[in-house]
Image (spheres, grey):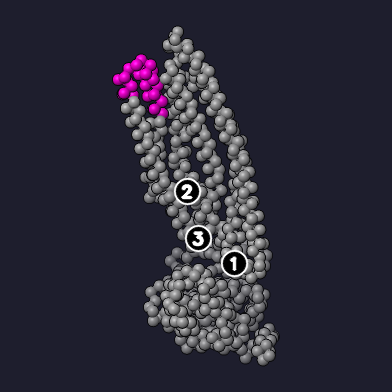
Amino acid sequence: MIKRLARCIREFKWPAILSPLCMIGEVAMEVTIPLVMADLYDFGIELQNMQVVVQKSILLVLCALASLAFGSASAFLASKAATGFARNLRHDMYHRVQDFSFSNIDKFSAPSIVTRLTSDVANLQMTFQMMIRMAIRSPMMLILAMISAMGINVRLSLVFCAALPILIFALAMLVPFVFKIFDRVFKTYDKLNTVVQENVHGIRVVKSFVREEKETQKFTDISGSIFKDFCKAERIMALNNPIMQFCVYGCMLAISWFGAHMVIASGNNPDLGLTTGQLSSMFTYTTQILSSLMMFSMVFVMLTMSRAPMKRCYELLTEEPDLTSPENGVQQVADGSIEFQNVSFRYSAKAKHRALKEVNLTIPSGATVGILGGTGSSKSTLVQLIPRLYDATEGTVKVGGMDVKHYDLEVLRDQVAMVLQKNVLFSGTIKENLRWGNPNATDEELIHACQLACAHDFIVGFPDGYDTHIEQGGTNVSGGQKQRLCIARALLKKPKILILDDSTSAVDTRTDAMIRQAFREEIPGTTKLIIAQRVASVQDADMIVIMDNGQVCDVGTHTELLETSPIYREVYESQKKGGDE
């Protein structure tokens, strides 16, 4: 897992390497300062030797400046490496998500993916920065300070050996409990993002049903759950601080006691004793050693917190897309003919029921096909197999006489334009949204496509015309206007197959008829699949497919189905009666 995430360092490997080296230089200077201080006191101040005082003072200033320079360089390089790592990680994860099929997206859920790309990456960025600084500083400080302390007096340094086991035992006891809590916390973050996303996306529904208090309470409950888990984790980790303080002050007391005896003993036998300057250095090394241990415990806390985000980012990076282009995939779609051969489909391997059941259907190129069926009859599922948004569980789907699995995905999807039930417009101008269909489309082509989709008239009615800004999600245009813009966007692809998935439901009958008339006259060679609820939208089609419970029940023209299909006749008569009334 760490090896895979480490690949995201890439061009920032030198800052990531140089930062720890600078940190080692800073630590070396900090450890040297107490030794210089001891000499300053013992051989300068104690003996009233001003030459030594001046020399050691200059050396102290140089060590302090060198420590400052190394520390600043380390901080700058670590910041650059960490932000670069986060940028690359976020890029790699987002790039991977773009390759996901719908089933991969369903597996993680959109809010979870957002959490992984934002807060999880931010946590890993902080952890990485701490790892190349604090995780290097604490062990180096511990090692160098211990060596220096033993160089002054080995027996007095044994005091530290008594404190180390206590601290290590405390960390070993605390960390496992915290791991479980943080695992739970980051899963709860996904739920929090889901609530926020649903609320913001559906704010009009929330307000129209006066559900603000209910939504606020839902958010408060989940937020409170995160608060409780964090408090519980912090309470456990807070035990680390008093244990650390106990060891620090215990070591201080022990060094004061034994050190004082050694200083007194040095009056009788200097070889067995300790100087005053050396004793003051031992106090400094005590602080450095135990503060490095405290730093080490902070690193453990950060690693504990980052374990869950690390795992979640790794899952996203290593998820293999269910749908991939074959090697040397077919680069050209011959025509718009479509064939379903014994096609069955489940949304997941665990699903008990099949969404589609043994569908057999042949659609010639250039035909206009209407698809009717009740809610849940899998009309949308059927057409989503054509551009391989999902793969058939059983059977074969062919486009242009070729199995869709043999096509290069980009080539196939470029020749199949879909206008989905949930029409999506992106923030930007109308022109920018339309050019999703063809980035190189001229203004004349944009206008022509919009005229076919009956969108030109209302667009020129806006003050800024085609440069009118569309808000995120298309909230500043009506449902019918949004549908017509999406149809125009699909037409700009000049596809061999055009799929309209109930995409004229928000327009009036007259406009619907005008759009269908324009399709017949302007794009006769394009295969058109129209999923609709109104019989009037499909009765002029070359063939009409009736679906029920995931199966194709009847196929024929309007006249034929009125005679042979009870379902079609019932729908037609109910709508005709409603129209008459």
Mark earlier in primary sequence (2, 3): 3
For badge 2, the amino acid type reads: Gln
In this rendering, the label closer to the viewer, 1 or 2: 1
For badge 3, the amino acid type reads: Val
In this rendering, the label closer to the viewer, 2 or 3: 2
Q: Do the residues labelled 1 and 2 touch (CB within 8 Å)?
A: no
Identify whether 168 is placed above or below 576: above
Extent of the magenta region = 31-56
Give the residue drawn at x 57%, y 34%: 241
For badge 1, the amino acid type reads: Ile
- Which SS class for mark 3? helix
Instruction: Name the residue beneath numbered marker 1.
Output: 203
Q: Is there any visible trace of residue 293 in the rendered image? A: yes
Per the model, the C-alpha gap separating discs 2 and 3 is 20 Å
Give the residue drawn at x 58%, y 31%: 243
The numbered mark at residue 125 is: 2
Instruction: Name the residue beneath numbered marker 3.
Output: 97
For label 2, count other residues whose C-alpha is less than 10 Å away and answer few (under 14), some (14-19) or many (20+): many
The numbered mark at residue 229 is: none
